[in-house]
Amino acid sequence: MLTLTEEATTAVKTITAQFPDAPQGGVRIAGAGSPESQFALSVVDAPEPADTVVENSGARVFLDTDAAAVLDDRVLDAQIDPQQGSVQFAVTTAA
């Protein structure tokens, strides 16, 4: 199952905290079905019925079926640019 680094956990919690009307919300990752494909990230109120839910210290990530299969043994990391306020996510292999 996908795991989250501390940085990714912080980033997801920071992003979802901007949507207080969606306390069950999280970041949803949708994939195109192959390891080489791009993933689409969005903030949603709740997971879709078929989504896999990954939780870590209050951060919630929802994976569609394709993303869950491709990211099964991966790690989600994030880099936060404090000056720009931007977040860049990266997927790596588990150590």
Image (tube, rainbow, N blue to C red):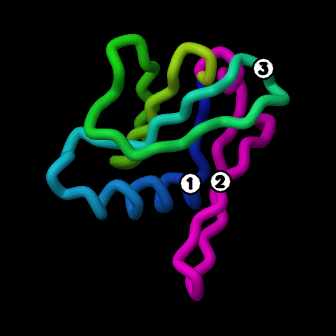
Q: How many marks?
A: 3
User: Helix, strand, or loop for circle 3?
Assistant: loop
- Pointers 2 and 1 in contact (C-beta within 8 Å): yes
Q: Nearer the viewer, mark 2 or mark 3?
A: 3
Residue at numbered disc 1: 8
Instruction: Answer left or right for 45 relative to 51.
Output: left
Q: Residue 60: image x %, image y %?
A: 39, 40
Badge 2 or badge 1: first in the primary sequence? 1
* Segment colored magenta: 68-95
Residue at numbered disc 3: 34
Badge 2 or badge 3: first in the primary sequence? 3
- Considering every residue shown, the one lying at the far right of the view is 36
Which mark, residue 89?
A: 2
Would you call the spot at circle 1 few (<14 residues within 10 Å), some (14-19), or many (20 or more)?
A: many
Q: Amino acid at mark 2?
A: Phe
Q: Amino acid at mark 3?
A: Ser
User: Helix, strand, or loop for circle 1?
Assistant: helix
Would you call the spot at circle 2 few (<14 residues within 10 Å), some (14-19), or many (20 or more)?
A: some
Quarter holding the N terminus is top right
Q: Amino acid at mark 1?
A: Ala
Q: Residue at x 51, y 26 (%)?
A: 63
Q: Residue at x 46, y 36 (%)?
A: 28
Instruction: Answer left or right for 38 relative to 41.
Output: right
